[in-house]
Image (spheres, rainbow, N blue to C red):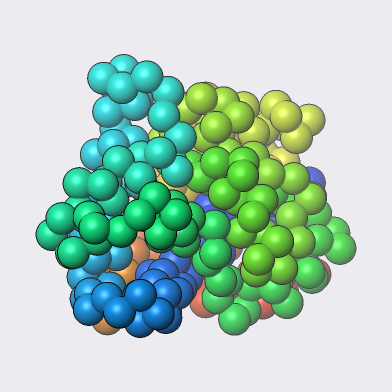
Amino acid sequence: MIQSPIKALTFDTFGTVVDWRTSIINDLSQYGNGLGLSVDWAQFVDEWKNAYKPGMDKVRRGEWPWTSIDDIYRRAMNDLAPHYGLDGLDETALHHINRVWYRLLPWSDVIPGLNRLKQKYIISTLSNGDVAMLTNMAKYGGLPWDVILCGEIFHHFKPDPEIYLGAIKMLGCEPHEVMMVAAHNDDLRHARSHGMRTGFVLRTSEYGPQQTTNLAPTEAWDVIANNFEELATALAC
C-alpha cells in the first residue's frame, strides 16, 4: 500500500482505460454490415493504429504543424481507404468511421474501479487524445473523470516532458503527489523520470491475442495491479 500522500491519479486512456481494439472492431463491423461492406476490420484497425505513432512523431519533430490525434487518424484513414474499399464512401460515412475513436468502451473493471478511486483522489486523463475525443468517449462509456488533460491542451504528445509537467502544474500538485496509471511500461518510465508515482495495470489483450509487449511490468512500479479494482484496493479505496 502506498504510504506517502497522493492527491491525484492521471490515466493513460487508450488501452489502459478503454478496450479500443475490440470496441472498433465491433462498432465498424456493425456499421459496415449496414453499408454492405466486406472488410477485415481487425486487420484494418491494427494497420490504422500502427499509423498513429508515425504521424504523432512527425508533429513532435516539427515536420507537421500541431495536428490533433483526430486529424492524424483521419490522414491515416484516407491513406488506407483504397486498400479496404472505403474510398467510394461519402464524407458522412468516412467521418463516422474516423469518429469511432470517440465511441470506445472501457474494460469491465474500469467503471467500478474509477468510482472507488474518485472518492479519495482527483482522477484525470493524461492522454495523447484530444479534448473532444476524450470528452465524448467519457460520455459514451460513462467514465467519471474529474478533469480532462491531454496532448491538445499542452500542444505536446507523450513522451514529451511538457505533457507530464503540465498536468502536474494544472492539478496544483507536486510531482510525487500525482500517480500516472498506465498499461504501458514506457509511459510510466517517462512519468517516473519527472518525479511522478507510478501504477501499472495489466492489459495483456490490448492489441489482441498476438500481443507481445507490456505483458508484465518491467520495473518495480509503485503499484502493480491486474485491474482497476486491485488498483483501488492498493490505494486504500
The image quarter containing residue 184 is bottom left
Q: In this view, does 158 lie above or below 87?
A: above
Q: Where is residue 188 in the image (x, y as percent from the top left)?
A: 47, 48
Count of numbered tags? 0
**Image point (21%, 70%), residue name:** 43
Q: Which of 127 and 101 is in front in this view?
A: 101
Quadrant for the C terminus, please. Answer: bottom right
* Furthest residue toward left: 83
Q: Which residue is drawn at 35% across and 54% down?
A: 90
- Residue 119 position, x and y percent, is 86, 63
Query: Can the viewer see residue 110 in this picture?
Result: yes
Residue closer to the observer: 148 or 94: 94
Left or right: 218 with respect to 177? left
- Residue 76, above or below 170: below
User: Which quarter of the image is occupied by the N terminus?
Assistant: bottom right
In the image, is 126 to the left or to the right of 178? left
Evaluate whether residue 220 shows in this view.
no
Expressed as whole percent of the image width and height from the top left, the position of residue 52 reads 31, 46
Query: Which residue appears at 62% of the width and 41% of the height?
Result: 131
Left or right of residue 134: residue 120: right
In the displayed structure image, the side of residue 49 where residue 92 appears, left or right: right
Residue 58, by quadrant, is: top left
Which of the pair 76/46 is nearer the observer?
76
Q: In this view, does 7 lie above or below 211?
A: above
- Residue at point 24%, 66% (across, down): 44
